[in-house]
Image (cartoon, helix red, strand yellow):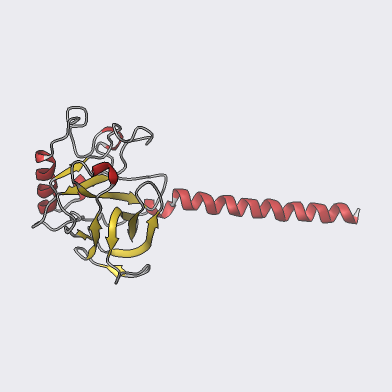
Amino acid sequence: MLVFIKKRRWLKFILIGAGLLLLAFAFLVIRPDSYLPHKRIVLHVPYSLDDPPISLLPMGEKIYHPDSPLGHPGIDFQWSGPNSKVLASASGKITSIKLVYDKWNKWEMDIENWPYILRYKEMENYNRSLKVGQHVNTGDFLGYPANPPAHHEIGAYQIHWEFASVSLLRDRFCPVTYFDKVSATSVQAVWDKTQWPYKSQYPNICSGGYANKTE
């Protein structure tokens, strides 16, 4: 009888522990705090207005990203040379700086401005004075674009930039309506001059699954 009671007690502890783990996992994925009232962020383009990209690859396209559920989850900003500076699109706290070991082996940085996350990926190098936990301001220098093997022939240097939510459930947003007026004009001008053979299929900066996807 005593053994049976102890087994029931252990089972109770296991079930409680499993329930707490499930709740913690659900919180991390859903992040209910991201649905609380908050100030809508205003974004600046992740580059100097005096040194705009020569082209961009839009969100939502599935030509090069057929395995992504909603298509390309960010915007690729492309320059003709390696010295263009990647700048912070908004203020926030650096939550991650890491070298991603994939087919390109480039640096990426996450900056959180609750309930938003700005991701700067595929950088050749980053500003080594920056550390995880540090606060940055809009326009701060973050790093340099990379010239990945896929772009060697066209000579494009790029970053992959994402505007996301802290909630994995909410995923990423289309940034177009979040840009300040000057930034919105600049990024649209870049898109207008972008020579991309699939523009007829993906005519907007945010097309496909990310068309008009905001909060």
Residue at horizontal 71%, vertical 56%?
A: 13
Residue 113 visible, this orientation: no
Residue 154 on image: x %, y %: 18, 42
In this rendering, would 80 be left or right of 207? left
Where residue 6 appears, as percent x and y from the top left, is 83, 56
Where's residue 150, x and y in %? Answer: 27, 42
Quadrant of the image occupied by residue 199 = top left
Q: Position of residue 177 (x, y in %)?
A: 19, 46
Q: Nearer the viewer, residue 28 or 125?
A: 125
Q: Residue at x 24, y 38 (%)?
A: 212
Looking at the image, which residue sits at the far front?
153
Is residue 43 shown above or below 65?
Answer: below
- Quadrant (top left, top right, bottom left, bottom right) of the C terminus: top left
Q: Is residue 52 above or below residue 57?
A: below
124 vs 120, nearest the viewer: 124
- In the image: residue 190, left or right of residue 38: left
